Image (tube, grey):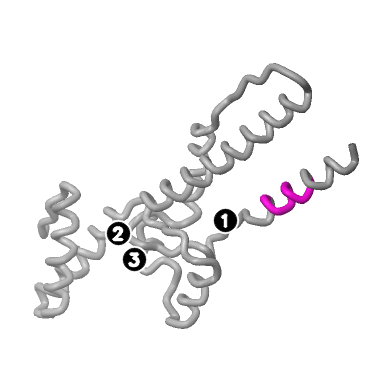
Amino acid sequence: MKIKVLPALCAAAALCGCQTSNQADYVQIGYGPSFDVAHAQCELQKRSVDQGYIAIGSPGFVAGAGIGNAIGNAIAEDDFMRNCLIISGWKRAPHGQAAAASVATGASATPYGIARAPGSWINTALLDWKDANNKCVAGDKAACATRAKLGAKLKSAGINPSPV
């Protein structure tokens, strides 16, 4: 009986060692909320992918079915979190490369000015478009190009920015 417990403990330890979900493992790939906001939103929804199970039989079979269901649910939750964070503008980077890249370049973890307008890339894009528009009106050619690029992104989202 004790011999059967050892492989199960080794398997559980190996599976537990694979879990990582640290902000340092994510890089921002587009406009969107801060990592904390995006992670919290996804965390609230991830339990919706869990599947229940029914097992009838010996205690060993029922326990095995429960463990298999728990592993399947953990995999489904991880897939959901990955996809949800991608939709929110964050992508999982190879372990350790995200933090190393930001330190090497001196870039912040939020390159799109999310601190100015948390919660929506549209808010930030509109603020950036307004700043670029003001500079373009003053004669800055580079700001005119930025305004055009941001205007195109906003128009593709159904928003037509116009100076007021």
Mark 3 element type: loop
Q: Residue 112 carries which label?
A: 3
Residue plotted at (51% across, 39% down): 46
The residue that mark 2 highlights is 124
- Comparing 15 with 93, the one in front is 15
Amino acid type, residue under disc 3 in the picture: Tyr
| Dominant secondary-structure state across the stretch colored magenta | helix
Q: Judge depth for marks 1 and 3 and give the one in front.
A: 1
Disc 2 from disc 3: Cα separation: 8 Å
The magenta span reads 9-15
Residue plotted at (57% across, 37% down): 73
Q: Residue 140: x percent and y percent?
A: 13, 80
Instruction: Tell which circle, 2 or 1, labels the residue nearer the N-terminal end.
Output: 1
Instruction: Tell which circle, 2 or 3, labels the residue nearer the N-terminal end.
Output: 3
Residue plotted at (37% across, 56% down): 89
Q: In which quarter of the image is the N terminus?
A: top right
Q: Residue 36: x percent and y percent?
A: 50, 54
Residue farthest along the right direction in this orientation: 2
The residue that mark 1 highlights is 21
